[in-house]
Structures are given as C-alpha cells and as structure tokens.
Amino acid sequence: MDKQKDILNAALKLFTEFGFHGTPTSKIAQEAGVANGTLFHYFKTKDELIVALYVDIKKQLGFCVAKDIQAEDSIKETARKYYVAALHWGIDNETEFRYIQQFLSSPYVSMIPAELVEQSLAMINMIKEGIKQKLIKVTPAEYVMSIISSHLYGVNQYINSQKLSTAKQKQLINESFELVWKMIT
Amino acid sequence: MDKQKDILNAALKLFTEFGFHGTPTSKIAQEAGVANGTLFHYFKTKDELIVALYVDIKKQLGFCVAKDIQAEDSIKETARKYYVAALHWGIDNETEFRYIQQFLSSPYVSMIPAELVEQSLAMINMIKEGIKQKLIKVTPAEYVMSIISSHLYGVNQYINSQKLSTAKQKQLINESFELVWKMIT
DNA sequence: ACATTTGTGGAGTGATTAGTCAATCATAAG
DNA sequence: CTTATGATTGACTAATCACTCCACAAATGT
C-alpha cells in the first residue's frame, strides 16, 4: 500500500547487504515492487533516499528511546532507561542498527539535516545535570556521551554476534549499564 | 617510486573523502600519478584494492601496537601499552582510522582474509590470562575485548573531534585507560 | 460532471565506469 | 647484441547506472 515505506524497507535491506555502491536504484525499485520512476517520484536522487532512510531510522530509535522516560525519574534511572531502551532497540532492529553504523562511517554523514542533530541534546543535557549534581565525575558532557554511545555500540555488536538467549541478553544489558555507570560516577 | 604504495595512498585519501561508491578507479590512478592500466596491474579488481588497503593499514597498526610490549610486563602494563599505543596511532593516523571504521561498517568486511583474524588473538589471550588470574572480573574475554575496542573507538573519535592540545590528549589517554581498567576489574 | 493534482509505470538516454588490450619502455641476464 | 620478463601506458569497450519523460490512472476538490 504505502510505496514510500516499501522503498525504504527495500533500500534498507539492499544497502546493508551490498553497500551503497553495490545496490542500484533499479534493484531497490524491483525489491520494493514498484516501477523505477516511482522511486524517483518519492526521492529526487539516490543520495536523498540514503539520507531519508537514515532520518527515518533515527526517528524510530528516538521515539522508542524516549517513550518511557518520566519527569520524576532520577538521573540514574533516566540514564538507565535510555541505555536499556537503545540496546533493546538495537537487538530487535539489527539491520537498522547496522545501517546507522554504515551511514555514520560514510561520507554521507555530512548530509544529515540540522533538525536531527537536536535530538541527542536531551541526553547531553541529562549528563550535564548529572555533572552539576556531582553525580557524574567524568567531564565534559560530550566526552561522557561519546563513551556511553560507543559502549552501547560495542555491547550491541557483542550481543548480536553471539546470538545469546533472551534471558542472557537481558542480564547482560542490565549488568553492562552498571558497568558504564560505575565508570563515569 | 613505489607506484603500488602511491596507489594505496591515493585510494585511502579518496575513499575516506568520497566513499567507495564516489571514487572511480580512474580518479585513484590520476591522484596517484599513474596510468589507469597500472592500477589494474597491481590490483586485479577494485574490490581487491579496497581489501588490500585495509590489510595494509591493519598491519601498520598491528606493528605499531605490538612494538614496545615486553615479556616481563604485568597484565595491566601490557593492556595499558596496547591501549595507549592504539590510541596514539589513531590520533596520528586519523584518515587510516576512519578508513578502518568505514571498511568494517561496509559489506566488504566479509572479504577480510583469514590470516588477518589471527592478529587480535594476542589481545584476547592476554585478557583470558587476566581472567584466569582473577584480575579481570568481567567475562567472557570476547565481551571484554568488545568493550575495550569500542571504548577506544569512542575516545579516539572524541579526541579527533575536539582537536585538543597534545598535553590534554596525553592526559585524557592515560585517564581513559584507568577508566576502562576500573570498569573491567 | 469536470478540472486539478498526485501517484505510477516503464521504456529510453547520456554519462560514467570497471576492466581490457596491444603497444612501448626499462632492466637485466645469457 | 639478443632475448625475455615485467612495468607502464592510455585509448577503448561493453555494461551499467542514475535519472528523465511522458502517458495514463487514481484520487481529490469544486
């Protein structure tokens, strides 16, 4: 029904399997079950599709991560919720996660629209609040953010490469948050 | 003089700037100052060049990281040396570091030759020894390795993005090792 | 009923690209 | 000098690709 969504799904599948280079727009259209011209009706250029796919995925992640944060949560609880939600999302959406990595390591990074940059501001502000409360000992906030992000990325990669049981996954996720928390406080 | 090296250097520069997709072999040859045919004399296909460049860079890194490890060093000292050397290498070779990331996030990963996989075995074994000695509390070794690698990656990215002074860099590198060490012991 | 916009298809095109090839050049050994 | 081997060149090609164009269909508004 929704051809735009079909195109994005097809693009995700093919880009992660064959790379940006290795997947022609014609194959994307074919996989999506639409005509070649239809693809270019929704996305003016291949580059625009590549960036739009990233934006779409980032929005999904952002929504999923923010959804059960509550105003009365402590800093640690907020941090844990962010962390755990992101990790679960990464496990449930392995392909999307790989696409984010692939995109961020490519020259297309420079095409990220400004609106999207604001999204991670909420997390930076939480960290800054933690620093102000002398809870978080490592500074500056950007450095902490960098450490947490890469940790998340590493744990995700490990979990996906090992194909652990759901129970083991849950345990590892909680433990790994305590590990990071111990490191920065 | 050494045209093969010239081609690799040109490829590194262009691939990191424009991506695998965005850099035709003709441009690489041009940048290297050789004829189109010469490139294919040294590398049968573009894919082979992409993989060969990765292997070449990985060997440089491997050599640099291993060079001042001594047999009598303690586990912690060995770990610190690995960590610090890798981080310094990443700072001094920003482009190479970015290429590694780009390569590892691309579908070309699956083309890594088997010989190269062995390289990281030394580090895994060191971690296993640390676990056996009850020094490192987090298990299994592959998980620890994953955490350290991604931490390294994150710190590197932070340092390069902030363009800190050399003195601040040194301080951050040492502190960040203690951070990771605290986390896993 | 009509007009206007929006979606869809797929053949077609000009430009680009990975890789080839036959011809030279350099070097060194017999 | 002759022969052989490998390096080097750059014009060439067959294939591919991003993107266009225009005809038509479906929905939407008046």
Image: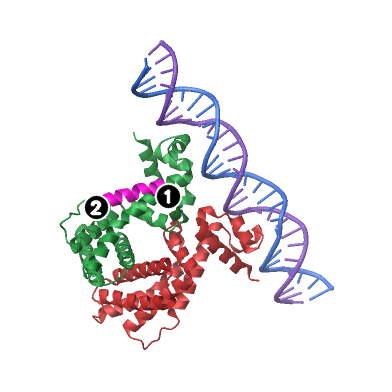
Chain colours: A red, B green, C blue, D purple
Mark 2 belongs to chain = B
Which quadrant would residue C22 be assigned to in this image? top right
Q: Is residue B7 visible?
A: yes
Mark 1 belongs to chain = B
Could you tell me the amino acid type at mark 2?
Ala
Q: Indicate the position of residue D23 as horizontal and vertical percent values.
A: 77, 57
Which quadrant would residue A6 be assigned to in this image? bottom right
Do the residues indicated by labels 1 and 2 lie within the same chain of the protein? Answer: yes
Tell which residue pokes out farthest to the front in this image. Answer: B132
- The label on residue B15 is 1
- Along the horizontal axis of the image, is B77 left or right of A13? left
Q: Is residue B59 rendered magenta in the image?
A: yes
- Along the horizontal axis of the image, is B178 left or right of B26? left
Q: Is residue A122 above or below residue A101?
A: below
Q: Indicate the position of residue B97 as horizontal and vertical percent values.
A: 34, 54
- State the residue at coordinates (33%, 75%): A176
Give the alpha-carbon distance from disc 1 to disc 2, as whole Å: 27 Å
Front-most of B56 and A167? A167
User: Which quadrant does the C terminus of chain A fall into?
Assistant: bottom left
Q: Is residue A48 above or below residue B115?
A: below
Which portion, as a residue range, is magenta?
B51-63
Q: Is residue B162 rendered magenta in the image?
A: no
Magenta stretch, main secondary structure, is helix
Could you tell me the amino acid type at mark 1?
Phe
Circle 2 crowding by C-alpha within 10 Å: few under 14, some 14–19, many from 20: some
- Along the horizontal axis of the image, is B102 left or right of B60? right
Circle 1 crowding by C-alpha within 10 Å: few under 14, some 14–19, many from 20: many
Q: Secondary structure at mark 2?
A: helix
Q: How many marks?
A: 2
- The label on residue A41 is none
> Disc 2 marks which residue?
B66
